[in-house]
């Protein structure tokens, strides 16, 4: 398969409103998307979120109820749940340090960098740290949307859900996590999706870009 130019992929993808429940995304394509999420950049390399991949129909049905009945959650074959750390802790940051030591060696500058990070992050209120972690999850979401398009897999980013309900369904609070955004994966129902035939709407370059030369 010849790789498509990036902008062609972005023009192809859209927030799919109706997915075909008879089609399942192959595991190799899901794995590519997951690996792209794993490789996404995050602030200070902390990767302060986890990815929950839900295929169980009963669990997805419960999550759909917490998301106002959005059918893509159950009509798609996979649901990705991006769950951010509820707070930064010394242990969580130390684990990041350990990963760096394994990959790069036990460098003095490494410890100094993350000690400084702890001195800045740990005194902050939990809601401030959660908001920061959630923003890192959104970086990964953006990467995931492009990766899905590259695999010709349809997806829909979703914020319209009850996070507390989803957290309870997936047992996230006990793990120090909070659900941030959902991303169903599947294949568009070309005969049933009202949005598919409509043109993509985006602001012009001149209206959205300011250049200082």
Image (cartoon, rainbow, N blue to C red):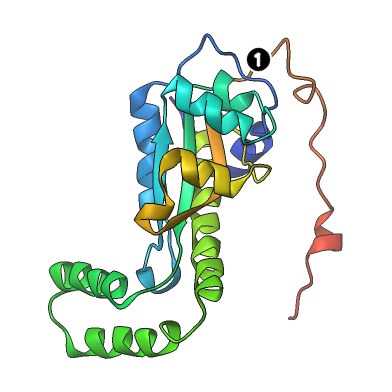
Residue at x-position 44% and y-position 65%: 42
- Which quadrant holds residue 176? bottom left
Residue at x-position 79% and y-position 36%: 200
- Which quadrant holds residue 70? top right
Residue at x-position 27% and y-position 70%: 96
In this picture, is 45 found above or below 138?
below
In this picture, is 84 found above or below 70?
below
List x then y, in percent, for residue 134: 53, 61
Can residue 186 be seen by looking at this rendering?
no
List x then y, in percent, for residue 135: 55, 63
In this picture, is 27 found above or below 113?
above
Can residue 192 be seen by looking at this rendering?
yes
Please name whichever residue, 30 or 183, is drawn nearer the observer in this view of the structure: 183
Count the marks.
1
Query: Is 129 on the left-hand or right-hand side of 35?
Result: right
Please name whichever residue, 90 or 35, is drawn nearer the observer in this view of the structure: 90
Q: Which element carries disc 1, helix, strand or loop?
A: loop
Residue beneath disc 1: 189
Residue at x-position 75% and y-position 80%: 212
* Quadrant where the N terminus is found in the figure: top left
List x then y, in percent, for residue 213: 73, 81
Q: Residues within 10 Å of mark 1 (few under 14, many from 20)?
A: some
List x then y, in percent, for residue 73: 57, 27
In this picture, is 30 found above or below 204?
above
Query: Is 156 on the left-hand or right-hand side of 4?
Result: right
């Amino acid at each position: 398969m010849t790789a498509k130019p990036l902008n062609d992929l972005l023009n192809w993808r859209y927030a799919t409103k109706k997915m075909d429940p008879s089609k399942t995304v192959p595991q190799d394509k899901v794995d590519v998307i997951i690996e792209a999420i794993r490789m996404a950049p995050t602030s200070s390399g902390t990767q302060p979120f986890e990815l929950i991949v839900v295929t169980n129909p009963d669990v997805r049905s419960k999550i759909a109820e917490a998301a106002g009945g959005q059918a893509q959650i159950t009509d798609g074959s996979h649901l990705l749940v991006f769950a951010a750390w509820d707070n930064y802790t010394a242990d969580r940051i130390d684990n990041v340090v350990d990963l760096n030591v394994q990959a790069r060696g036990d460098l003095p500058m490494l410890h100094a960098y993350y000690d400084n990070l702890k001195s800045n992050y740990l005194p902050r209120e939990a809601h401030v740290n959660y908001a920061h972690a959630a923003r890192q999850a959104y970086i990964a979401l953006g990467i995931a949307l492009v990766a899905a398009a590259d695999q010709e897999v349809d997806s829909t980013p979703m914020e319209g859900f009850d996070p507390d309900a989803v957290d309870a369904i997936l047992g996230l609070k006990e793990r120090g996590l909070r659900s941030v955004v959902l991303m169903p994966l599947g294949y568009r129902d070309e005969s049933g999706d009202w949005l598919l035939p409509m043109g993509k709407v985006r602001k012009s370059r001149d209206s959205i870009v300011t250049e200082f030369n």
